[in-house]
Image (tube, rainbow, N blue to C red):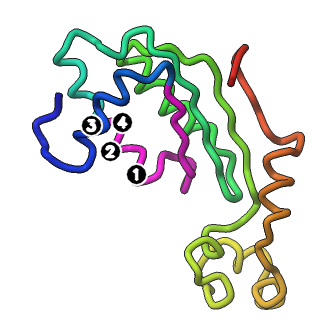
């Protein structure tokens, strides 16, 4: 296992014992976020034990704001298949909720893509609501690959 003694260390046995893994990431700039990328890199230490993730089923999920997160999902799949795990499915969608509204600066941010697209009027009138997430996850833009996702 990894020699770094931190909060991830107790999760290694749980990862090994899991019947399958569900790996999800939000996607900024059409790539993995800053939590998923190092997590996947830390799994590299498993290789020192003769591929213990070999044949471990996993599902890759990506959620983007305005850009489709396909590259982020593909990055998860590429990394996990390098560890010889088996992708049994993937899902990706966009919420059309801009990052400025997730970090809390939505109504004052004038440097983000939302402001460039919708301007001052949009900045003052748009509100993130749960219905945005619900419609994004249930709409036709959701792409699901794979035969069985439980």
SS at mark 3?
helix
Query: Quick check: 13 left or right of 73?
Result: left
Label number found at residue 115: none
Is mark 2 in CB contact (under 8 Å) with mark 4?
Answer: yes
Quadrant housing the C terminus = top right
Location of mark 1 (residue): 35
Location of mark 3 (residue): 42
Is mark 1 in CB contact (under 8 Å) with mark 2?
Answer: yes
Is mark 3 in CB contact (under 8 Å) with mark 4?
Answer: yes
Gap between marks 2 and 4, in whole Å? 5 Å
Front residue of 101/122: it is 101
Magenta region, residue range: 21-42
The residue furthest left is 3
Location of mark 2 (residue): 38
Is mark 3 in CB contact (under 8 Å) with mark 2?
Answer: yes
Gap between marks 3 and 2, in whole Å? 6 Å
Rendered view: 98 above or below 28: below
Q: Earlier in the sequence, mark 1 or mark 4?
A: 1
Rendered view: 113 above or below 12: below
Query: Quick check: 63 left or right of 43?
Result: right
Q: Residues within 10 Å of mark 3 (few under 14, many from 20)?
A: some
- On the image, the x and y values in percent for residue 15 come to 37, 28
């Amino acid at each position: 296992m990894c020699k770094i003694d931190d909060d991830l260390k107790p999760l290694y046995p749980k990862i090994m014992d899991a019947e399958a893994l569900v790996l999800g990431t939000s996607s900024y700039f059409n790539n993995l976020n800053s939590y998923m990328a190092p997590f996947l890199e830390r799994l590299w230490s498993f290789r020192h034990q003769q591929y213990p993730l070999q044949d471990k089923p996993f599902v890759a999920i990506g959620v983007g704001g305005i850009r489709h997160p396909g590259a982020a999902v593909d990055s998860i799949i590429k990394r996990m298949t390098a560890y010889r795990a088996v992708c049994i499915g993937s899902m990706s969608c966009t919420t059309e909720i801009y990052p400025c509204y997730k970090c809390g600066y939505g109504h004052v941010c004038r440097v983000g893509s939302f402001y460039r697209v919708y301007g001052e009027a949009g900045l003052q009138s748009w509100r993130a609501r749960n219905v945005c997430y619900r419609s994004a996850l249930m709409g036709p833009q959701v792409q699901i690959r794979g035969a069985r996702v439980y």
